[in-house]
Image (tube, grey):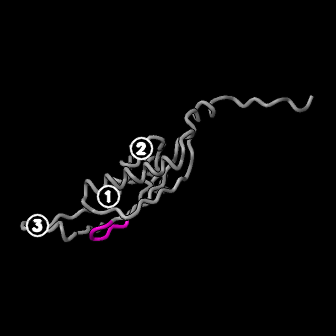
Amino acid sequence: MSTVPTEFERTDIGEIQIAPEVIEVIAGLATLEVGGVAGMSGGFAGGFAELLGRKNPSKGVKVEVGQREAAVDVSVIIEYGHRIPEVASAIQQNVKRSIENMTGLTVVEVNVQIHDVQFKNQEKLDDQPEISPQRVK
């Protein structure tokens, strides 16, 4: 784990350092606050951790942090019925605002990748028996 000290975070009594993992958590939580986001998409490691019962607020988030700027990539699952461009734009705005307000870093880009669409009644559809017409008499 590396920390990134910035020039404006040096005070007369010491330094303030923010780990990139902290920025990932902020971005993940800000993404989940947006309406229409069903969840984060985080690959094998994130999915395996969830199977073990661990919640990972930085799942599906990658950050690149410099001395004064940050770039963020988030991978999400969208709820069916929501306009994807509107949800993605809201994610970009909320992530940018949250990181800048909490850390003082300037967010230069927030890239949103849509990995899946989740249906609201997916559980009900999976539980219903499949009815197929009889093809042969």
Q: Is residue 57 visible?
A: no
Separation of disc 3 and disc 2 at Cα?
35 Å
Amino acid under label 3? Thr
Name the residue located 26 percent from the left edge and 67 percent from the top edge: 3
Foreground of the two, 101 or 65 = 101
Separation of disc 3 and disc 1 at Cα?
21 Å
Question: Which label number is shown at residue 23?
Answer: 1
Rendered location of residue 52, percent (x, y) = 43, 47
Foreground of the two, 70 or 132 = 70
Q: Is residue 90 visible?
A: yes
Quarter that holds the C terminus:
top right
Find disc 2 in the rendering and name its residue: 34
Instruction: Give SS at disc 2.
Output: loop
Looking at the rendered image, the disc whose residue lies closer to the viewer, 1 or 2, is: 2
Mark 1 and 2 residues: CB-CB less than 8 Å, in contact?
Answer: no
Highlighted magenta segment, given as a residue range: 64-69
Label 2, residues with CA under 10 Å away: few <14, some 14-19, many ≥20: some
Instruction: Give SS at disc 1.
Output: helix
Amino acid under label 2? Val
Name the residue located 49 percent from the left edge and 47 percent from the top edge: 86
Label 3, residues with CA under 10 Å away: few <14, some 14-19, many ≥20: few
Find disc 3 in the rendering and name its residue: 11
Q: Is residue 8 above or below residue 35?
A: below
Separation of disc 1 and disc 2 at Cα?
17 Å
Q: Residue furthest left?
A: 13
Q: Is residue 24 toward the left or the right of residue 17 in the image?
A: right
Amino acid under label 1? Ile
Name the residue located 21 percent from the left edge and 64 percent from the top edge: 17
Rendered location of residue 82, percent (x, y) = 53, 41
Q: Is residue 57 magenta?
A: no
Earlier along the polypeptide chain: callout 3 or callout 2? Answer: 3
Name the residue located 38 percent from the left edge and 63 percent from the top edge: 63
